[in-house]
Structures are given as C-alpha cells and as structure tokens.
Image (cartoon, rainbow, N blue to C red):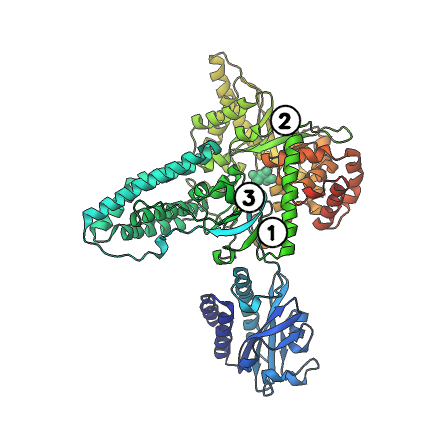
C-alpha cells in the first residue's frame, strides 16, 4: 500500500495544474483501493462551503456545481470534526444529506477524511462503495496519509496561483507567503522576473564542424563577459563595501579558471558547438556543486549558472549585450529563482524597490548585497513559483520575510500607508536619530552596533553609538575560500579597533557550525544547532582559536578597547578552557609587544548568554568573566525548542514568549546581583517592541544592526522609564507572545510611536 501511495503522489505532483492533478488522483485512488468512487471537495472559506472538485464514481457533471455547507451532511461533518468518518451505511447516518446532482443513490459504505494544512481544513477526500461495509483500518490509514500529502500539493498550487478551483475563498487570502528576511524594509511593486534571452537549462546541444571558429567564438564570449562583469562591478564600486566586492572577484576568478576553458574547448574538439560545449561542462559543474553537502558551496552553483548564461548569450548574440533589460516603469520587485549579484548590479537602481529570491538564504550573496544597497529583500520563498510572482503587484516585508500577492485596491492602500509611514519615519529618524539616547525622564541608555560585514561602514552610520556590541567574526571567515591567516585577521580587527579607539569593541570568537557553514571546513551533522558550533568547535581546535585570539590581541596593541566574547557557552569548564588559551596568547603577544616597547592591555573577556543552561550558573560565570552579552536569537531557539531557520515552525518562534521574558528577567537580575555588566545583542534589541520590553526588564545596554540604531534611539527618546518600570508586572503576567506584543504596542501607541510597530516590530 505504501508503494502505491508513493506512486500516486509522485505521478500527481508532476501535473502542474491542481484541478487536473486531483482528477488523476481520484481515479488512481479508486483503481488502487478497488472502491467504487473517490471524490475530493475543496473548502471555499468566503462562501463557507465545500465544492466537489474531482470525482471518479459520482456524476462528473456535478463537479464545480455541488456545494455543501461547512456543517452540512456527512462531508460537512468530516470537515467540522476534523477527523476521519468511516460509516458502513451512509444513507442511514443521522447527518446524511442527499444531493441528487451527484447521483450517489447506489452507494452505502462511506469513508471521508479532512485535508488539513496548518490547522486549516482545505477540503475533504472520500471513498464510497456500493456494498454496505466498514472500511478496514488499513484503508482508513491510507486515506489519512494521502490526505496529509495532498494538503501540501493544494497549498503549493494555491501559492503558485494555478488552480481555478482555488481562485476564490481559500483560507489564506490575501495570498501571503513567508520566506526568510534577507534585507530590512518594506516595498511594493510589480514582480519583474529576470530572464536571459537564452538559458543554458533550455539549450539543446548541437554539433558543429568548424572547431576553430567555435573556439574563437567561445573565447570572444568569455572576454566580452569579463568586460561586462567588470563594468558592473565598477558601476557599483563606490556603493559597495570591500567584502561585497569580493563577489565580483569570484566571477572574475571563475572566468579566469583555465580548467573551465580547457574542458569547454575539449568538448568543441569532440564536435559540439561553443554553446553546447559550455552547457555540457556547466551541467557537470553545477550538479557537482548542487550536490555538495555544504550549503555555502551549494550556493556557488548559482554563480556558476548565472555566469554561464552570460557567456552563452554572448556566444549566441555577439555584440548584443545580454544584460540589457526591458524593465517596466515604476517600482519593481526583482524576482529570480536565484538572484545573483550581477543581476542586482545591472538592474536600474531607481526602479529597484525590492528583491525576492526563490532560493537562497540570509547568507546568500544577493542578501548581503541587498543589505549593502539598502534594498528590502526576502529570500528562500520555496513554496512559490516565479510565474505566480512575475507581472503581479507584490508587497514585501524584509523585516519579517513576508510576501503578499494579489493585492486588491484596499490592501494596496493600507500597505502604501505603511510604506509612507516608514519613509516619513526614516526621514524624522535621520534628522533626530543621532541625538543623545536618553528617555523622556532622563534615563540614559547605551546603544551599540552589531557588525561583521564592514564594521567601519556600520560604525559610520551611527556616530553616537557607544561602540561595537557584537562583531560577528564568522562573516569574514565565510566570505573566503580558506581560513584567513593571522595577518589577514589582524588587519581586519585592527581596522575595527582603531576606527573608534575610545569606544568598546566586542569581537566575538568564531561562531561557525549551526546554520553558518565554512565551505572549506564542512561539518555534516543530523542536528547542527545542537552540535559542533561556536566555542565547542574552536576549543576542539585550539589552533584556530589561538590564531584568532592572537590576531585580536596584536590588533589591540597600543589600544585598550578590545572585548573578547565567547559564543555558545554552556558550562563553566568551557570558560576556563577558553580563558587559559586567551592567557597563553596574551603572554605570547605581550612578549612580542614588549620587545618593541609597545603596550598590550588586558582584554575584557565575556560570554554570550544564549543557551538556557547558563541561567542556572550565572554566579559561577560571573566570577570568571568581565561582561555578559545576551543572544536572544539562540536563547529563544533553545528555550522554546524551535529551529530559528525552519519556516514550518516559525510561528512558534517568538522572543516575546513569556518564558523568554522570564529568562531575560532572571539574567538581568543575576547580572545586577553579581555586578557584571550585561548587553543584549540579539535581534530583539533592534525591534521597537523588543527594545521597550528590554528597558522594562531593566536592561540599559542594547546592541543591534546599524539599520535599527537610529530608530531605537528615537524610540528611547520618546519613552519614559518610570512608565516602563510600572508596566513590568503586567508584562510578566501575560500568557502568550501576542498578549505581550499587544501590551507593548499599546504603550508605543500611547507615546505616538505606533507607526514603528510594523517597521521591524
Ligand atoms: C544570538 O544568538 O542572539 C546572537 C546575537 O548570535 P547569532 O545570531 O550570531 O547566533
Ligand atoms: Mg547566537
């Protein structure tokens, strides 16, 4: 039975239009299960009925016509009770209702099961038999399993917008899909899908006799592509931080790679033309990259395919720029299967309102670039096809990762209000955001920046900031093809430490593992977030740890602002081990410094509080370190047992959960009692609601991404610490995250800050 189930699902999922897929499904089920009828009814929430959508056994003319109220008959009963109903003789059931159009008079045995997705009943699937009998447990289990799988197909079809049956009244109107936040901000515009005139994926290989001519053609195309990519990179160079420019260097390196050229020319010698030879080689490369376990390397397949499409277009259209775009007037949301850096670079900046990448994550080059360019972006929108997005009016929320499709006039207007409010706010904030960070009643707060991509640029954006509260050193590690040398690290850290010599700069030691891979140091684990990450990995590799700490210490010679932060601390012994290594590195560097008559100050050493175990060993940790930094992102993930990157459970992930607030309260009280300074550096600190919650809880130091700094400064200047303190008991007594957020929103509204809630709240 399991194999028939697999066959049915496999075959049905190949059919792109849902209506046709369901027709095939019911006839396959009928034949496989040897029943007399199988039918599917889909929910229409607007009209509150179930519509017969596909049947093999009932009258086909009734499809689309028979509409059964949500609480009517045995079909309605299945939907209402949200569980299977197995009846020996349906006509004698008290809830049976006769629908003459379906012509089911001769049927007696009935089994129906609801099709449910994320707690919503999408429809009902039934099997019927003429003979009165009870369906067996196996048959019931089959139908339940099938229903769970069809639910996904239905949701996918709805998101793709390719089902007539789902056009109205589906439970998810307006069509909202959740992806991964790639770059903050709100935008609305027409979805514009970038298409190369010729796409390698669709290119059919063909033979050619003139080897010499094809080789020349290929080499010219590579040269032309190199010039185009360099021009794009030059156009953007003043807007891009150094690390991001490395993306274009990668393209240059790929073009220079002799191996690629040699392989293509070998295929040309075999008799293929230039385009076909390129396709044959690139297909092999891309498959190799796509099959790599390491997500960073998998992402590189995007660059290879993008680059090859550019070469192909140059081969086929010598002299015709493949990147020339015909972009519609007005704001556009750039949509692509995998948005690449050059796609972004060549898109007219004045029309680029936002970006959607079907594949990719927060670490993708496109996301990094979008953040550098200040364009809102949503990544990893896996459940939608480009067809559903292109030429459609779209709203994207780069803070939450939400994309809304099929906007009606009223919805559009309300989103426009949000966008306008955000713009007005940004203007206001940019004028006043650098004023001292003091509440209405005179309580000052310290704001710091979370950096990593380019701390100098980030620091520049907020001159008033009191320093770097979190420098994520793993990002420069991830942007390279090997571990950075001590010298490379030294130069990077030196530039950060010396930009603001009087401000505290917190460099976190390498926090890779989990969702942050290093292409050159692959780790394959069943549960990466519970595995070898953060300090666990670096303590097992004192070589990596010592090189990094030495680089930090050498960079701090002559300065006294270095703070070293240890990620993923779970136990006291990890702190002891790390401190021993830091001391060893300190003594080595001190000797070198003394030899040159230079001064090395002792760095402050702190730990991230992001694993729940530390809540219970705060006094022991306090004896060993100079400061605490609370990582609310991981603390929430581990406290609630919700993977922070899993879209399926993302509705359960909330740093406003009362348990998270209780943990934060315990941390704040524990830090105070043990006289250890504490900063909060997770995303919560950069959200307006989160910042006021943290203020009410007693935190006075917040570190956040550069985009949020001015906004939070503005919030703080308009709030009142006494009022927030008074709010705390009520806040702590709330039952769930929504109630917590609603109380905080009300407070912000009372301070005329309501417009901030959407923008990152
Ligand atoms: C956190 O976990 O809250 C944090 C700041 O670290 P990261 O997001 O880098 O894991
Ligand atoms: Mg963390």
Closer mark to the observer between disc 3 and disc 2: 3
Q: Residues within 10 Å of mark 3 (few under 14, many from 20)?
A: many
Residue drawn 30% across the image and 40% down it? 223
Farthest residue toward the top?
597
| Mark nearer the N terminus (1 vs 2) | 2
Ligand 1 within 8 Å, label 2 CB = no
- Residue holding disc 1: 650
| Mark nearer the N terminus (3 vs 2) | 3
Q: Residues within 10 Å of mark 1 (few under 14, many from 20)?
A: few
Q: Is residue 616 above or below residue 77?
A: above
Q: Does any portion of residue 191 appear in the rendered image?
A: yes
Q: Nearer the viewer, residue 110 or 139?
A: 110
Contact, CB < 8 Å: mark 3 with mark 2? no
| Mark nearer the N terminus (3 vs 1) | 3
Tell me the SS state at disc 3. Answer: loop
Res 464 label: 2
- Residue holding disc 3: 376
Label 1 to label 2: alpha-carbon separation: 34 Å
Q: Nearer the viewer, residue 281 or 588?
A: 281
Tell me the SS state at disc 2. Answer: loop
Q: Is residue 54 left or right of residue 676?
A: left
Q: Nearer the viewer, residue 760 or 334?
A: 334
């Amino acid at each position: 039975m399991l194999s028939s189930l697999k066959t049915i699902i496999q075959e049905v999922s190949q059919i792109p239009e849902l209506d046709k897929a369901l027709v095939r499904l019911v006839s396959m089920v009928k034949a496989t299960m040897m029943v007399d009828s199988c039918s599917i009814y889909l929910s229409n929430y607007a009209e509150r009925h179930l519509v017969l959508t596909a049947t093999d056994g009932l009258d086909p003319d009734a499809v689309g016509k028979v509409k059964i109220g949500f609480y009517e008959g045995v079909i309605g009963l299945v939907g209402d009770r949200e569980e299977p109903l197995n009846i020996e003789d349906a006509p004698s059931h008290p809830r049976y209702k006769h629908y003459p159009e379906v012509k089911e008079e001769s049927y007696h045995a009935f089994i129906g099961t609801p099709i449910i997705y994320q707690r919503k009943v999408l429809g009902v699937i039934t099997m019927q038999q003429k003979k009165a009998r009870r369906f067996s447990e196996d048959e019931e289990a089959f139908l339940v399993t099938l229903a769970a799988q069809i639910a996904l197909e239905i949701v996918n079809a709805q998101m793709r917008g390719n089902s007539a049956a789902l056009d109205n009244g589906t439970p998810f109107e307006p069509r909202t899909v959740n992806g991964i936040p790639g770059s903050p901000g709100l935008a609305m515009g027409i979805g514009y899908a970038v298409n190369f005139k010729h796409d390698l994926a669709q290119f059919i290989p063909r033979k050619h006799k003139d080897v010499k001519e094809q080789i020349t053609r290929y080499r010219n195309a590579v040269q032309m592509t190199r010039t185009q990519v360099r021009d794009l990179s030059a156009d953007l160079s003043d807007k891009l931080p150094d690390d991001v420019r490395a993306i274009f260097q990668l393209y240059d390196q790929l073009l220079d790679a002799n191996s690629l050229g040699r392989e293509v020319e070998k295929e040309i010698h075999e008799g293929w033309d230039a385009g076909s030879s390129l396709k044959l080689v690139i297909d092999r490369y891309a498959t190799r990259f796509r099959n790599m376990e390491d997500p960073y390397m998998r992402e590189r397949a995007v660059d290879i395919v993008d680059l090859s499409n550019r070469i192909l277009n140059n081969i086929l259209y010598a002299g015709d720029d493949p990147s020339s775009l015909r972009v519609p007037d007005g704001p556009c949301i750039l949509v692509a299967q995998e948005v690449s850096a050059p796609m972004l670079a060549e898109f007219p900046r004045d029309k680029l309102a936002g970006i959607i990448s079907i594949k990719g994550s927060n670490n993708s080059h496109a996301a990094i670039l979008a953040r550098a360019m200040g364009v809102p972006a949503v990544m990893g929108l896996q459940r939608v096809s480009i067809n559903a997005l292109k030429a459609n009016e779209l709203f994207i929320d780069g803070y939450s990762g939400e994309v809304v499709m099929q906007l009606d006039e009223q919805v559009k207007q309300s989103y426009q209000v949000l966008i306008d409010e955000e713009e007005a706010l940004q203007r206001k904030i940019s004028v006043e955001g650098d004023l001292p960070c003091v509440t209405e009643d005179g309580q000052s707060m310290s704001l710091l920046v979370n950096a990593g991509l380019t701390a100098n640029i980030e620091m520049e954006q907020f001159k008033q900031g009191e320093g770097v509260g979190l420098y994520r050193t793993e990002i420069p590690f991830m942007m390279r093809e090997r571990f950075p040398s001590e010298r490379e690290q030294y130069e990077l850290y030196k530039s950060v430490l010396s930009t603001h010599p009087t401000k505290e700069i917190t460099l976190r030691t390498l926090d890779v593992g989990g969702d942050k891979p290093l292409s050159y140091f692959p780790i394959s684990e069943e549960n990466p977030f519970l595995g070898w990450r953060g300090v666990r990995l670096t303590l097992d590799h004192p070589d990596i740890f010592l090189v990094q700490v030495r680089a930090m210490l050498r960079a701090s010679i002559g300065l006294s602002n270095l703070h070293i932060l240890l990620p993923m601390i779970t136990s006291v012994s990890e702190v002891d081990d790390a401190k021993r290594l830091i001391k060893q590195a300190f003594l080595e560097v001190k000797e070198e410094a003394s030899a040159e008559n230079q001064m090395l100050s002792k760095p402050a050493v702190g730990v991230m509080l992001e694993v729940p175990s530390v809540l219970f060993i705060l006094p022991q940790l306090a004896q060993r370190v100079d400061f605490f930094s609370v990582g609310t992102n991981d603390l929430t993930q581990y406290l609630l047992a919700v993977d922070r990157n899993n879209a399926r459970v993302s509705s359960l992930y909330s740093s406003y959960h009362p348990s998270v607030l209780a943990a934060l309260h315990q941390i704040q009280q524990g830090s105070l009692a043990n006289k250890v300074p504490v900063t909060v550096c997770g995303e919560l600190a950069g959200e307006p609601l989160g910042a006021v919650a943290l203020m009410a809880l007693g935190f006075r130091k917040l570190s956040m991404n550069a985009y949020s700094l001015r906004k939070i400064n503005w919030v703080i200047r308009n709030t009142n610490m006494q009022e927030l303190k008074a709010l705390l008991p009520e806040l702590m007594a709330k039952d769930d995250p929504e109630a917590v957020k609603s109380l905080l929103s009300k407070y912000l509204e009372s301070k005329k800050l309501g417009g901030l809630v959407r923008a990152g709240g």
